[in-house]
Image (tube, coloured by chain):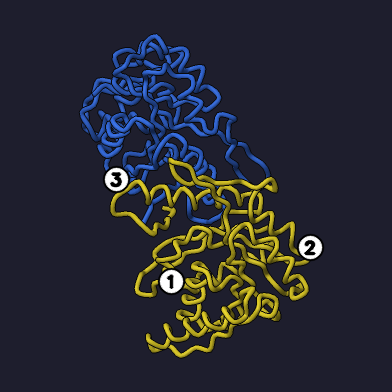
Chain colours: A yellow, B blue
Amino acid sequence: MRIALLGGTGDIGEGLALRWAYHTDHEVVIGSRDPEKARAKAEEYETELSSRGVDRKINGFENAMAADRARVVVLAVPAYHATDTVESIADSLDDETILVTPATGMKRDDDGFHYNRPGAGSVTQLVANAAPETVPVVGAFHNLAAGRLADLDTDLGIDTLLVADDPDAKDIVSLLADDIDGLRPLDAGGLNNAAEVESLTPLLINVAMHNDGLHDLGVRFE
Amino acid sequence: MRIALLGGTGDIGEGLALRWAYHTDHEVVIGSRDPEKARAKAEEYETELSSRGVDRKINGFENAMAADRARVVVLAVPAYHATDTVESIADSLDDETILVTPATGMKRDDDGFHYNRPGAGSVTQLVANAAPETVPVVGAFHNLAAGRLADLDTDLGIDTLLVADDPDAKDIVSLLADDIDGLRPLDAGGLNNAAEVESLTPLLINVAMHNDGLHDLGVRFE
């Protein structure tokens, strides 16, 4: 399956690109607003994989071209770029495309990080509102610590939560998550449940900040 | 240490009462608006413990009397009763008392449960606003599934998150949590971080609702 990681030059995009390229046979494509940067990062990932004995071709393109013909498009961009990015690639999306959003909105004060809930209800809902009506949106991969994800020497051993209103799209993304060693996908229900999923990200940062020895935290539901 | 569980006849109060009485030497006192009900439940807990070979005296009183001379007072009441309960016991609190609140606000729709954030910012902050200024408030025990907590045959193996602005009060409640076998207290920072902690409760319910085989869920930060 072809997976496009838009914002694939950023840290969460890097982690997902490396994990899918390392653990699976899916075709991974890196997208960026700047195609040169996309190509440079894609080459970096190829080098990293090659150093581990895995020879994979990873292409880098401008976002709309990366999204073109991808079955799954991951919006690995900051929340404030999510709707712009969807609009910039709208012509590359068709009924077969699934949009995946891992972004969450946060603000910081002296105590720590806080969920900055958008008026739409969640960042996932913002993306769904910006997407063409026929394109299903899945919220997933919000709560993965980027450093841990990108370090292929680290076993993950954590869960990721999925929200979507389209059950088939959710199933496909769930299988893609399950393809990554040590990552367990869990169904958190419909898009209306996205805010509680997105709120987990600032909580993980706060817990890591306030407890010695805990960093790059993930979560297990038990 | 004397611990008063107000609303100790409800399910989360029952679980904490049984766990502290079973695993520790702390004196456990049950509070209720109805002293008869408090006494009846306290006797039930004594019988349950006795059946496991643990003979403990557990007293039951009206809330204000239960809170009197307790070092730690746990408000194991629904969120909409939290401030009323604080006001009804205000005369029993002194500078040595620590108030603990495990309540969270939730609403439900067809998709699942949602965090119903109070205007004050969190239920923990609501309690802090209602408490006398000299009484420190600690948010803790929000994310414990009541059924699992009350079943002494079940190993917990989960974390609980603490928020407070008073570090000494937080340390004392953290030690009390740590006294319960299988429960790991983690510091989630100041009271301003309470909303993200309280949001975890509806998320746990939603994940349990949407995944076969998962119920009475807790969480581990790893």
- The image quadrant that residue A61 belongs to is bottom right
* Left or right of residue A59, residue A143 in this image: left
Q: Give the residue drawn at x 52%, y 56%.
A: B212
**Residue B76: image location, x then y, percent:** 43, 27
Q: Is residue B94 above or below residue B191?
A: above
Q: Secondary structure at mark 1?
A: helix
Q: Give the CA separation, mark 3 to mark 1.
A: 31 Å
Q: Which mark is residue A150?
A: 1
* Left or right of residue A129, residue A18 in this image: left
* Number of numbered callouts drawn: 3
Give the foreground label among 3 and 2: 2
Q: Which chain letter matches label 1?
A: A
Same chain for the residues at labels 2 and 1, yes or no?
A: yes
Q: Nearer the viewer, residue B198 or B157?
A: B198
Q: Which residue is mark 2?
A: A133
Kindly identify the amino acid type of the residue bearing the numbered disc 2.
Glu
